[in-house]
């Protein structure tokens, strides 16, 4: 029964049988059979097909709303009982962090906490938060504002400087505060909400948006426009600091947050991990 309910919740998030099967690593036929089993059990139609997508009925929506918190708690208990007992922390990390300065930080943490095993997953920040809430991850290192995350413990461990990569790495006659069109991250990212206001204050206009800071940086390097990216992304791609226009002195940074469910953050192993991460991240 729990398998079937988890399938229903996953389908509500993905919207298609194919995406749900990919997420769950089972066949589309298995997804359909599990949903059909729930409909027989509850004697209610839970989903309706509209082309390739599915639409939840009133009964299906109500069932997802009721079981989702219960499944999250079950996953959380499972993590606490098994992973923490083994000294393992299941960690979701923003892709741009794990592709830049994150591995160096986690390597040092592992040296300082030799009894801790890290299981790392690279995701976009909104996905990290969703999987924390669902109980799939124990801890998240992600970006963005914490204002909407009142159900989670969220501590800022670093303010990562933002920089402008001039188009084609050519000299740019520009003073911070002047109007400038830039390529930068798209609105659904975790970082956008935390940099949008300061960009406006500094008269930086997002002319083009992309789904990845690394894609933004590569487009800027190739001459498609000026790119606004975290300093760690520019550094990872080997952009000489002499080419960069730093913006942290003007207050344009992206906050990096340590996030966990409240019950998980209270555990000694997670608090020890947080202490090391916050100390090392602040010193970067």
Image (cartoon, rainbow, N blue to C red):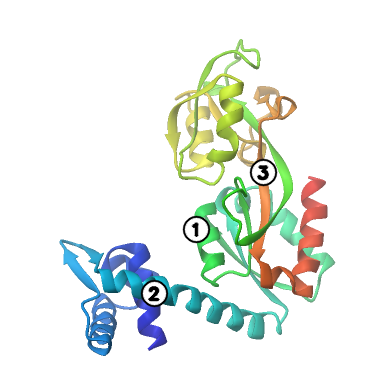
Q: Is the residue marked by circle 1 packed among few (<14), some (14-19), or many (20+) residues within 10 Å?
A: some
Please state the horizontal and vertical placement of residue 258, each as a whole percent of the image: 69, 57
**Label for residue 13?**
none
Task: Give me the residue at 77% from left, 73% from top.
Answer: 269
The answer to whether residue 199 is seen in the rendering is yes
The answer to whether residue 108 is seen in the rendering is no
Q: Which image quarter is the C terminus in?
A: top right
Mark 2 or 1: in front is 1
What SS does tag 1 mark? helix
Task: Give me the residue at 81% from left, 61% from top.
Answer: 275
Identify which residue, 61 or 200, lies in the foreground: 61
Please state the horizontal and vertical placement of residue 189, each as a whole percent of the image: 50, 45
**Label for residue 127?**
1
Task: Give me the residue at 82% from left, 46% from top.
Answer: 283
- Indicate the quadrant where residue 207 lies: top left
Q: Earlier in the sequence, mark 2 or mark 3?
A: 2
Q: How many numbered badges does the structure rendering display?
A: 3
Residues at marks 2 and 1 touching, judged by CB atoms closer than 8 Å: no
Task: Give me the residue at 55% from left, 59% from top.
Answer: 129
What SS does tag 3 mark? strand
Q: Is the residue marked by circle 2 packed among few (<14), some (14-19), or many (20+) residues within 10 Å?
A: some
Mark 2 or 3: in front is 3
Residue 119 against residue 226 in the figure, above or below: below
**Label for residue 255?**
3
Residue 118 against residue 240 in the figure, above or below: below
For mark 2, what is the residue?
A: 24
Q: Earlier in the sequence, mark 2 or mark 1?
A: 2
Please state the horizontal and vertical placement of residue 164, each as a whole percent of the image: 60, 26
């Amino acid at each position: 029964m729990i398998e079937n309910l988890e399938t229903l919740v996953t389908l509500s998030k993905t919207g298609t049988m194919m995406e749900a099967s990919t997420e769950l690593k089972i066949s589309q036929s298995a997804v359909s059979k599990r949903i059909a089993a729930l409909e027989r059990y509850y004697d209610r139609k839970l989903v309706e097909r509209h082309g390739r997508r599915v639409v939840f009925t009133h009964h299906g929506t109500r069932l997802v709303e009721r079981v989702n918190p219960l499944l999250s708690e079950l996953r959380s208990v499972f993590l606490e009982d098994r992973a923490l007992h083994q000294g393992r922390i299941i960690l979701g990390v923003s892709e741009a962090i794990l592709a830049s300065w994150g591995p160096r930080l986690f390597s040092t943490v592992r040296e300082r906490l030799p009894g801790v095993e890290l299981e790392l997953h690279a995701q976009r920040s909104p996905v990290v938060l969703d999987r924390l809430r669902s109980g799939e991850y124990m801890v998240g290192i992600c970006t963005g504002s914490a204002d909407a995350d009142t159900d989670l413990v969220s501590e800022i461990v670093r303010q990562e400087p933002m920089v402008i990569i001039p188009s084609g790495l050519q000299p740019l006659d520009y003073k911070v505060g002047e109007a400038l069109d830039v390529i930068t991250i798209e609105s659904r990212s975790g970082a956008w909400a935390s940099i949008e206001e300061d960009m406006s204050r500094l008269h930086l206009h997002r002319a083009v948006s992309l789904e990845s800071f690394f894609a933004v940086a590569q487009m800027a390097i190739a001459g498609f426009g000026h790119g606004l990216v975290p300093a760690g992304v520019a550094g990872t791609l080997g952009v000489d600091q002499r080419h960069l226009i730093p913006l942290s002195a003007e207050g344009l940074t992206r906050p990096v947050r340590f996030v966990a469910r409240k019950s998980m953050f209270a555990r000694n192993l997670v608090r020890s991990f947080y202490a090391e991460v916050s100390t090392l991240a602040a010193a970067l």
